[in-house]
Image: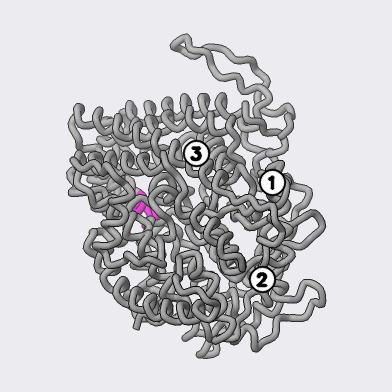
């Protein structure tokens, strides 16, 4: 990143306490960007810009909080809720930019900044929720029926949510308890940062280096090219098989050399040493925090402001799905073992599952994913698939803006409009893996839609797709196609948000339904009328044969037992780590993991959790603590919504009309209203679990 002179020109001075004020001269974060839609000036940003901007933002936020706390005017939405929800604009701006960049380009310098500022932000959060003066202002407004009646429905919902958040974060504790809670929060934050950074290092360090070309047998040209590029980037001869975050690696279905499969699988599943103990420490501190707040365990605290509301609701979902999923696994295992035996493999191992699962899919269901791969070129999947579907269903249009600089040279920028020309915002895609990027796939925002502030969304999707050699196309697997549609479902939630206040925008919904819109968007990935536009052969341009796609659809339930079981194993692990009472310390995290899977009926010699404890970033550093169940919980809404879409389309309604109704009812409202009530308004009833059970072959 290069430098450009922007921002205030006045020199640094001292504040009223004699402390040196941060020097923001030439700092592109100091003022809102003048670029389209407020896109940050990434071309001007340097690592050294962040600490001064954070210091200034934290100071401004403290001043804002003091102003709210000491006001003698009657509390109002504008004087209490808005400043507490939105905070200081500089701090909001620098935080969004920094935490995106540290996840996608986490250099040692950026990680050092992260380690320094995370405690500041944790302390600042506690300065809000543990300040009795602030809670008194919120509580007074919350208890004033006349004042509440004068608010809009969105404002009443935000006030209710803010009041609940204060209570759940300790506002009613006594001063000594608040001091203890603040110390716990600081230590949890510090350990979460260590977990993130170490898990990223472990992921990079687990790459498998090969020097014999024969060991690459089974990989196609694109996969070989990506492995060669990874080796070159690492300064190595030969080929480097880099890892993605989940346990099962994307090359396992292709690698013919069983010893290489074993190396790759073990490298993935046995990742981490320090992270296991960090996970145990984090879980213990979270359980102590929950006990301090009056909850039996952290899971009970975590679901209190989600749609599940109580732990029993989550455990009922597990109970309904674990048994059927494991029965499906046994059926799949028998077929896979029989196929492996034909190759002389009698001792089927976890690293063989994906390889022979793919062969059963090819031979029994006539689905050859290797033969399909030339039809899935990344750029075409995005432009003619993901973005085209958004146009057909929701009326959005996308224009590439190569004149705008994204957060990384590989990132692509699109300007988003409605078909009538109305501006919507910007969409940024950063798709290729690299050493300094954390694993996985996610969506985040740099700006959100707010009618009150006049802001528009800047939305980003980040993935970890293997980068091809220069000049060669990037191919994606069927799973990666679905991931592209999934993450763009989150983007749609932000792009189509239509709320008054920023704090209610887009994905500002309860954690256990945030995956709902993204999972719904997966329905378009292989849908007739959409897939033919993007699934075209890289050389001939011919669309993928219709019979091939039909085989993929008809084989949808094959492998669903494994997929459900590996997910449930991770979800239950997350849950069991957070059902520990406050005085429990797990001394042997690996033994604990094994015991919990056995007790839950999810222990299977061939099926590991999608994420094991030592690299479970979702739960130990990614915001999903006691929340990984959310994917299945949200899929109940998703499957029921897809059934609704199908019913409406079967009745002859145009897809645009149906899409716009879904957008108005669900996507546009963000966190401005009760989503359960909104869903009842769309569906005419509460959600039903049957479509989910049918989709996953659990009935």
Residue 252: quarter of image: bottom right
Real-space Cα separation, disc 3 to disc 1, in angstroms = 24 Å
Measuring from the top left, give residue 215's x and y in whole percent.
Answer: 66, 61
Q: Which residue is mark 2?
A: 385
- Secondary structure found at label 1: loop
Question: Residue reaching furthest top?
Answer: 18
Q: Which residue is mark 3?
A: 197
Residue 454 seen in the figure: no
Circle 1/circle 2 CB separation < 8 Å: no
Measuring from the top left, give residue 559's x and y in whole percent.
Answer: 47, 76
Q: Main secondary structure of the magenta part?
A: helix
- Residue 153 belongs to magenta span: yes
Residue 623 as seen in the image, left or right of residue 149: right
Residue 69: quarter of image: top left
- Secondary structure found at label 2: helix
Seen in the picture, residue 668 relative to 324 is either above or below; the reply is above
> Which color scheme did the rendering employ for the protein?
one colour
Residue 470 seen in the figure: yes
| Total labels drawn | 3
Real-space Cα separation, disc 1 to disc 2, in angstroms = 22 Å
For the point 37% across and 66% down, the residue is 605
Question: Of the residues under marks 1 and 2, which one precedes in the sequence?
Answer: 2
Real-space Cα separation, disc 3 to disc 2, in angstroms = 34 Å
For the point 72% across and 53% down, the residue is 228
CA neighbours of label 1 inside 10 A, class few (<14), some (14 to 19), many (20+): many
Task: State which region is magenta.
Answer: 151-158
- Secondary structure found at label 3: helix
């Amino acid at each position: 990143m290069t430098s450009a002179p922007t921002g205030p020109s006045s020199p640094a001075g001292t504040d009223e306490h004699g402390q040196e004020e941060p020097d923001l001269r030439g700092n592109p974060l100091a003022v809102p960007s003048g670029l389209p839609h407020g896109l940050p000036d990434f071309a001007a940003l340097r690592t050294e810009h962040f600490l001064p901007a954070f210091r200034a933002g934290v100071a401004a936020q403290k001043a804002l909080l003091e102003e709210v706390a000491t006001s003698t005017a009657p509390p109002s939405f504008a004087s209490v809720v808005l400043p507490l929800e939105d905070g200081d604009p500089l701090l909001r701006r620098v935080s969004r930019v920094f935490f995106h960049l540290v996840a996608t380009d986490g250099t040692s310098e950026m990680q050092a900044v992260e380690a320094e500022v995370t405690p500041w932000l944790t302390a600042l959060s506690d300065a809000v929720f543990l300040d009795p003066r602030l809670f008194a202002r919120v509580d007074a407004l919350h208890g004033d029926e006349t004042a509440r009646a004068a608010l809009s429905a969105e404002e009443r919902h935000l006030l209710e949510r803010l009041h609940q958040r204060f209570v759940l974060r300790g506002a009613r504790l006594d001063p000594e308890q608040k001091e203890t809670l603040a110390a716990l929060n600081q230590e949890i934050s510090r350990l979460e940062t260590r977990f993130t950074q170490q898990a990223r290092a472990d992921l990079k360090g687990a790459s498998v280096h090969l020097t014999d070309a024969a060991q690459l047998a089974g990989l196609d040209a694109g996969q070989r090219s990506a492995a060669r590029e990874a080796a070159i980037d690492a300064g190595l001869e030969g080929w480097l098989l880099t890892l993605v975050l989940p346990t099962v690696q994307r090359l396992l279905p292709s690698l013919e050399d069983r010893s290489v499969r074993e190396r790759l699988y073990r490298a993935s599943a046995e990742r981490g040493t320090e992270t296991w103990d960090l996970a145990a420490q984090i879980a213990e501190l979270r359980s102590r925090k929950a006990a301090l707040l009056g909850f039996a365990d952290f899971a009970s605290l975590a679901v209190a402001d989600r749609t599940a509301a109580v732990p029993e609701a989550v455990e009922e979902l597990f109970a309904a799905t674990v048994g059927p999923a494991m029965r499906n696994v046994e059926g799949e295992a028998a077929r896979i073992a029989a196929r492996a035996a034909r190759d002389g493999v009698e001792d089927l191992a976890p690293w063989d599952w994906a390889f022979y699962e793919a062969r059963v899919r090819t031979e029994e269901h006539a689905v050859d994913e290797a033969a399909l791969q030339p039809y899935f070129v990344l750029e075409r999947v995005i432009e003619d698939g993901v973005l085209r579907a958004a146009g057909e269903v929701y009326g959005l249009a996308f224009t590439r803006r190569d004149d705008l600089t994204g957060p990384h040279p590989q990132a692509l920028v699109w300007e988003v409009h409605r078909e009538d020309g109305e501006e919507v915002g910007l969409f940024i895609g950063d798709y290729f893996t690299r050493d300094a990027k954390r694993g996985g796939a996610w969506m985040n925002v740099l700006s959100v839609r707010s009618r009150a502030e006049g802001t528009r969304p800047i939305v980003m999707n980040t993935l970890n797709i293997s980068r091809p050699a220069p000049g060669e196309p990037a191919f994606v697997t069927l799973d990666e196609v679905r991931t592209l549609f999934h993450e763009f479902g989150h983007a749609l939630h932000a792009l189509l948000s239509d709320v008054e206040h920023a704090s209610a925008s887009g994905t500002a919904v309860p954690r256990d339904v945030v995956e709902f819109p993204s999972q719904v968007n997966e329905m378009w990935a292989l849908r007739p009328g959409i897939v033919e536009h993007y699934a075209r052969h890289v050389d001939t341009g011919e669309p993928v044969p219709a019979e091939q796609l039909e085989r993929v659809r008809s084989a949808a339930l094959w492998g669903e037992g494994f997929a459900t079981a590996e997910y449930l194993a991770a979800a239950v692990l997350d849950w069991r780590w957070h059902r520990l009472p406050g005085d429990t310390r797990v001394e042997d995290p690996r033994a604990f993991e094994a015991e919990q899977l056995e007790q839950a009926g999810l222990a299977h010699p061939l099926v590991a959790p999608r994420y094991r404890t030592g690299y479970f970033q979702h739960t130990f550093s990614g915001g999903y603590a006691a929340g990984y169940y959310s994917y299945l919980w949200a899929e109940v809404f998703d499957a029921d919504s897809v059934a609704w879409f199908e019913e409406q389309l079967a009745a002859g309604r145009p897809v645009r009309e149906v899409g716009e109704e879904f957008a108005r009812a669900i996507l546009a409202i963000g966190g401005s209203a009760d989503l359960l009530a909104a869903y009842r308004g769309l569906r005419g009833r509460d959600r039903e679990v049957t479509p989910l059970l049918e989709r996953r072959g659990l009935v």
